[in-house]
Each structure stands twice: as C-alpha cells, then as structure tokens.
Amino acid sequence: MTARSSLTVVLAAGEGTRMRSSMPKVLHPVAGQSLLAHVLAAAPKGADAALAVVIGPDHKPVADEVKRARPDAVTFIQHERLGTGHAVLAARDAIARGADDLLVVFGDTPLISAATFARLRAPLKNGAALTVLGFRAADPTGYGRLLVEGDRLAAIREEADATPAERAIKLSNAGVMAFDGRRALEIIDKIGNATSKGEYYLTDAVAVVRELGLEAVVIETSEDEVRGINTKAQLAEAEQVMQARLRQAALDAGVTMIAPETVYLAADTTFGSDVTIEPFVVIGPGVSIGDGAVIHSFSHIVQSSIGKKALVGPYARLRPGTSLGEGVKIGNFVETKAATLEAGAKVNHLSYVGDAHVGAKANIGAGAITCNYDGIGKHKTEIGSGAFVGSNSSLVAPVKIGSGAYIGSGSVITRDVPDDALAVERGQQTNREGGAKRYREMKTQDKTSKGG
C-alpha cells in the first residue's frame, strides 16, 4: 500500500459523559497510554500518510496529546456536534487535498491495529469506493447491522429501523471506514440530516455510494479489536484485552513470566533476552529491561531503564528517571527516583535514593536515605564508586560522598566526604550503670502511688 497516499481522520471530539469524569474520554489510559495515542500509533505513517484529528472546542489537553503522540498530525475543531458525518467534514481542508485513501476511525478504539488499516485500504486499490469494517458480535444489541448482497455491502441498518430478521444478523458495524479519496467529499457531502435528531450520520455513506453506482464492501475483524470505550467498565475490559496481548507478545519474545495473568505491562515496555518477571509486578510507561534482568514480585516500575542482569525487588518501587547499570541490585522495600546507579551498585533494603548518582559497586545499607528535598527545592547526592553507606544513614543533599568512602551507621552527613575517608556523625554513646533498673523502679512506684 506504500504506493498510495492516505489521510486518516480520527474523530476525538466527544465529551464522554458516561465516563463520569472531567477528563476527555480519549485521554483515559489503557496500558499506560491514552486511548487516542493507541489509535494514532496504529494509523498509517510515512511521507505519503497524512493524519487529521477532529477535537472539540476548548479541548486543549486533547490537542496537546495529539502533538505529543503524533507531531505530524493536524487538529481540526468541530464547533457543533451534528453527527459523525458532520464531524468528518470538520477536516474538509485536509480531505480536499485528495489523498488516494481516506480512513475514518474513532479516537476511543485503542485496540485497532495497523494491519487492519492496511486491510481496509486494499479494496480501494481494487476499485471499491468504500470499505466498512465489521465484526461478528456475540450480542449485537445496539449495533448497526451490515446487510450484504454477495460480496458487496447493501446497507447499514440501525437497530431501531431493523426488521426482526435483520436484528438476528450478527455482522455488526464497527464504525471504521475507508473511502476512495477521489470521491470522498462528493460522497460525504451528499449525506443528509433527515434523522430524528437532525444529525448527519456517516453510516448513510453506504446508501450514497450505492446511489452513485459505486461499490461498497465489508471486511471483518474480531470484536475485541473494535471495542469502543464509553464507560469505565468498558475501559477496564479494554485493559484486560490489551494486557493479554502484551503478555502474549512478551512471552513470544522469550520473557519468562511465572504467572503472566498477574503482571501488568505498558504498551511501550521493551525487553532484552532472558528477562524474568515474577508474579504481581506492575510496569508503567517508559520502561526498558535489559538482558538477564530479574524483576521480583510486587515491584512497581515507571519510566526507568534496567540494565543487564540487574535484580529488582521484591517490593521495590522505581520511579521516573531511574537508571540501573549492569548487575545492580535493588532489594526489598527500596524506592528510587531520578537516580542513576552504575554497574554493580547495591541498595538491598529499606532505603530511598532520589536525585542521586551512585557509582559502580557502591553499597547503600538498610534504612539509608538521600535527603533530596529541603521543602523548597530538590538537590543532588553523589556517591562515588566503591563507597559504603552504613545502615540508617541520612545524606543531606547537596552532598558528595567520595569513591571508597565509608559512612558510619546512623550518621547524618551534611558535608562532602573525601575519597577513602571515614565519616561518622552521631552523638557519643553514654552508658549509665544500673540506670534501667532505677528507671523501672521509679515508674513502678509512681504507678502504685496513683492507685494503678
């Protein structure tokens, strides 16, 4: 299909009131990406592929998401909501440029694939004026039915207008269409608004095509692929389908998952070879996992890079900006944020490392933390290679711990420590002989005198 130019028009102007949310519907996430971003990622790309997104007025967050996800896309505003046919014509200027193929898709169908877009375009190359995407619904209630005559599409019949025999048909309209770009405006402009709501419905394009003596055809896909999202329940269903896809793709790529149904992945997660993910792991957007890394149970990872043979968890939390070198160990109940840990560094348990650079083979003991926030701004901690930070130490940023330096347990470090230096900062221990016994006797006497 590379020889043909295309324009994809994504309809994303809906408010999504049934989502019960102040967030525009198409910005709700599935597998760490907005519904709209999934659709934009599947749309054709390349020098001959244009992309237009129709949004509602005052939907700047949607426009921003379009710019982030597909910088090559152009946005158009639908100022009045007068049906799907009217929405497509909001992008009239783009359509008028005359791409060979015009694709129309909704911004709330995150499971649609690039392969399906290619299949939609194939009949246009062979002379069809319109391709409609259909699916066999397990329960077609509420969907328009696709009425076919031989291998041609005769009509799309809305359920309210369907006969009992037509309602028994399970071949349903997915709403996604592809037009011959040379005839697209002619066809869409002929759609009328003689409906109960006075709106222009894109489904009427089938009748227009037939009136013009042109050919309309149907291609089919799975019901899962064309799930539209109108409620939070449907959003959760789409998440389940997407997670199943992502898990299967990871398994096919050689990732070991002991209980894959308990692992949650993001659409952009990448894996090296021989990666192992234990049960109950959540991986958010922007994560790459290197060869031989192991993610232990109950870990949560977002916007982080995990190096080869690194070990993470269990119960670890890697926040945005974490970068782990080869062989790094992040252990139980450790949290990192905006932190780079070089090869072989270890943070074994109960520690927080934020806004920090940790050198190779440094060792951070249990309960040690970097104090990176002073109530106003964030500051950086630098820990040199081979340094040892004792348990329950606090490193008050900005501060530098030199290579090979040793920080005594329980220290509060507020000044730089030179290479190979030993730093201990804590009050002198005092032992009072018999003091505990005298304390208990005093407390017991007080309790007795009060009638306790």
Image: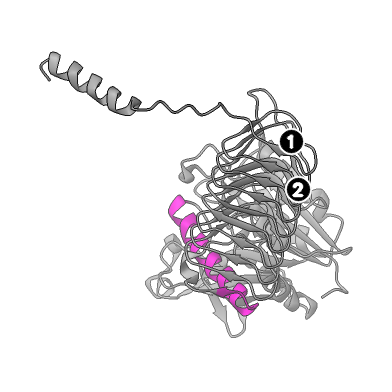
Q: Main secondary structure of the magenta part?
A: helix
Residue 404's disc number:
2
Secondary element under disc 2, as helix, strand or loop, is loop
Q: Position of residue 440 (x, y in %)?
A: 26, 26
Query: Viewer-nearest of labels 1 and 2?
Result: 2
Which residue is drawn at the image coordinates 75% and 44% (left, top)?
76
Q: Which residues are magenta?
A: 231-256
Please give left or right for residue 263 compared with residue 285 in the image.
left
Q: Report the disc number at residue 282.
A: none
Q: CA distance from mark 1 to mark 2?
A: 19 Å
Note whether 13 is above or below 425 in the view shown: below
Comparing 190 with 365, the one in front is 365
Q: 431 left or right of 217?
A: left
Q: Say which residue appears at 65% left-offset and 53% top-offset.
A: 36
Q: Is residue 250 magenta?
A: yes
User: What amino acid is found at the position of numbered circle 1 in the picture?
Assistant: Lys
Residue 343 versus residue 388 in the image, above or below: below
Q: Is residue 421 magenta?
A: no
Q: Residue furthest top?
A: 449
Residue 153, horizontal then vertical, whole percent: 60, 76
Read off the residue under disc 1: 380
